[in-house]
Image (tube, rainbow, N blue to C red):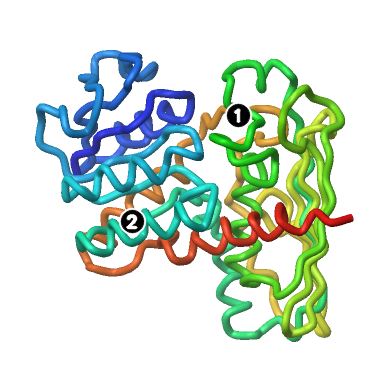
Amino acid sequence: MKYVIVGTGNISNTYVKAISELEHSELVGCISRSGKHLPANAEAPCWPSLAAVKADFDAVIVTTPNGLHCQGAIEAAKLGKHVLTEKPLGITIEQVDQAIAACEQAGLTLAVCFQRRTSPDNQAIKELLSKNALGRIFSADLSAKFYRGQDYYDSAAYRGGYDIDGGGPFMQQACHNLDLYTWFFGLPTKVVSTMGTFAHNIQAEDHGAALLKYDNGMIGSVVASTATWPGFAARLEVHSDKGSFTMTDDVISQWHFEDIPNPSDSNFNYNHDGATSAAVDDCSAHKSILLDFEDAIAQGRAPLANAQSARQTTALISQIYQSTNW
């Protein structure tokens, strides 16, 4: 698979490294309107647009800011190229649906890099939930209390705004955690939320909470923040009529079911410190996403984080933002 990376910001380095470590994947070049080359591979050719690419390629990886993911996907679809985009697929449902429609009409694969789905413990929980093996879930509480300094927000004019970033920690830093939440439990029927800006000079929220009600009676809660110094591991606590479990950064850290063995993979360790840094040094999960993406294209199947599934994440975040009526 020959790739062109659209965007040369920080996260593009992770994909450069991941591609270089895959035997059958190749980086052809990058797209940068500013002319900035990929920091991790300055020798890769750089073009101002996908239409200007002077090389053969099969797919694009969109690593531009949140609000531009849809644009990159549509441009790639017009050229008949498969698309893997950074999260989220779009900052509005309208954007998401436009990207989905463009790729579907062209018969192309569209996937989103929600790489935390590749964690063996997350996959084990997903399988148990899909079989209703854990009983009736009545409570699921997500805590995504991270921290970013003002320097992070000052590093680019769009950070912490609504037009490009799409919002604060709910849309940006906690997006991966909320993706797992919708992957496990789907969308709620009712949301009530409140949020504010407490520790930064930004347009959007830096701390907030939401209460979720599901049609099966489950009550969920979500706290997302970049104001909670010094930053904490993401934590999901789930309770059912059969027992409970806790996940800490994609690893089962507590398991309380009498008749169900703990499915945790003791060899797995999630190395990304999302609490205080935007950098992703460990590219192993991105390699898994790339391999799944390539196999999905070859087999004509849906990828692990397919567009319709990823749509739910943007839908939940939109619900949270639209329900701030306290």
Seen from the viewer's position, the closer of residues 38 and 294 is 38
Picture layout, residue 139 above or below residue 104: below
Q: Secondary structure at mark 2?
A: strand
Report crowding for label 2: few under 14, some 14 to 19, many 20 or more residues within 10 A (C-alpha).
many
Specify the quadrant of the image occupied by residue 207: top right
Image quadrant occupied by the C terminus: bottom right
Q: Tell me if 212 is positioned left or right of 34 in this view.
A: right
Residue 254 in view: no
Which residue is label 1 attached to?
A: 278
Which residue is label 2 attached to?
A: 110
Seen from the viewer's position, the closer of residues 94 and 32 is 94
Q: Residue 139: give x, y in percent of width and height.
A: 82, 72
Q: Tell me if 233 is positioned left or right of 28 in this view.
A: right
First along the sequence among labels 1 and 2: 2
Seen from the viewer's position, the closer of residues 77 and 233 is 77
| Numbered marks: total | 2
Give the residue type at disc 1: Ala
Q: Residue 151: give x, y in percent of width and height.
A: 69, 15
Residue at x 72% of width, y 83% of height:
215
